Image (cartoon, rainbow, N blue to C red):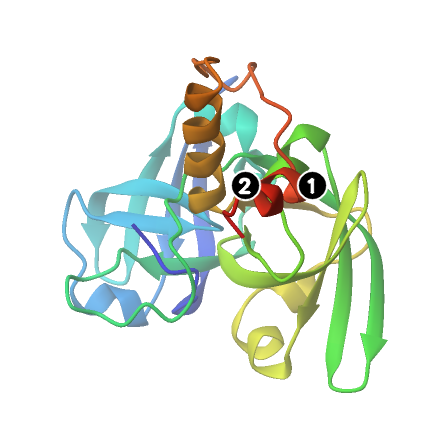
């Protein structure tokens, strides 16, 4: 479990890749203070397991499922990445509950500066994921806990403050860049519960009930 509060920006130092899998070596500083073999680290929002540690670097394996559903396959030596250690028991939850299980990817379609903020419009590759998004709700973009300030039938808009711009990789993103998306876990549980109540059990991501913001409001969930 993670919070979406990025601890530091690391660097990919080496990649060993196959057709649908990878092993990557990541250089970091802050998170290396107490890292151990088997620890879970969110890398651009993707929960991965530390397999080896060598001084200020650690390795993780990317299996085919992760390779095919996240943006990590697009990384190269020198690529900067967001890093967050798993939430410690008793620690502050500064963002929102983030599992590190990426739901899909999106493409940045618009970047608009506005006073001290920057608005990013992100088009979801899978529009069905938008059913988990509500105005002023939470979403994790490349592992960053963010608030949704706009929704269309294909896109969301998020607003980035200077602190986030300075301490994550979001400032390196350009139009047409791909980002990882994890929708709010609570929204997924609500959908599953409501589907069961209506007699429709969701067995996998290919089965979706038509639950939107109006439905949740009418039934007292929001």
Residue reaching furthest to the bottom: 115
Disc 1 on helix, strand or loop? strand
Left or right of residue 175: residue 61: left
Mark 1 closeness class: few <14, some 14–19, many ≥20 residues within 10 Å: many
Q: Which residue is mark 1?
A: 106
Q: Which residue is mark 2?
A: 219
Q: Are marks 1 and 2 in contact (CB under 8 Å)?
A: no
Kindly state the secondary structure of the residue where label 2 is placed: loop
Q: Residue at x 83, y 76 (%)?
A: 113
Q: Position of residue 176 (x, y in %)?
A: 80, 46
Residue occupying image coordinates x 46% and y 52%: 12
Residue at image x 46%, y 49%?
45
Residue 75 occupies quadrant: top right
Above or below: residue 85 compared with residue 112: above
Q: Is residue 137 left or right of residue 111?
A: left
Between 7 and 59, which is closer to the camera in this rendering? 7
Q: Residue 212 at x, y = what percent?
A: 65, 37
Residues 37 and 14: in front is 37
| Distance between the alpha carbons at the discs numbered 1 and 2 | 30 Å
Is 143 rendered above or below residue 17? Answer: below
Q: Dividing the picture into quarters, in which one does residue 8 lie? A: bottom left
Q: Is residue 135 left or right of residue 44?
A: right
What residue appears at the point 81 percent right and 39 percent down from the top-left corner? Answer: 153
* Numbered label attached to residue 213: none
Q: Is residue 121 above or below residue 17?
A: below
């Amino acid at each position: 479990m993670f919070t979406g509060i990025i601890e530091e920006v690391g660097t990919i130092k080496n990649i060993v890749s196959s057709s649908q899998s990878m092993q990557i070596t990541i250089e970091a500083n802050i998170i290396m203070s107490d890292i151990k073999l088997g620890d879970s680290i969110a890398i651009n929002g993707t929960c991965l397991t530390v397999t080896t540690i060598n001084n200020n670097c650690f390795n993780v394996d990317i299996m085919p499922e992760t390779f095919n559903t996240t943006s990590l396959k697009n990384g190269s030596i020198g690529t900067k990445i967001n890093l967050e250690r798993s939430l410690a028991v008793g620690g502050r939850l500064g963002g929102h509950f983030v599992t590190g299980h990426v739901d899909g990817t999106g493409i940045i379609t618009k970047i608009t500066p506005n006073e001290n903020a920057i608005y990013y419009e992100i088009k979801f590759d899978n529009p069905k994921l938008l059913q988990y998004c509500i105005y002023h709700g939470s979403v994790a973009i490349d592992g960053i806990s963010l608030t949704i300030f706009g929704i269309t039938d294909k896109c969301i808009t998020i607003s980035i403050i200077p602190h986030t711009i300075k301490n994550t990789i979001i400032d390196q993103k350009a139009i047409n860049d791909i980002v990882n998306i994890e929708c709010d876990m609570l929204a997924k549980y609500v959908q599953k519960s409501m589907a069961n109540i209506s007699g429709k059990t969701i067995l996998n991501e290919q089965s979706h009930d038509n639950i939107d913001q109006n439905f949740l409001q009418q039934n007292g969930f929001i």
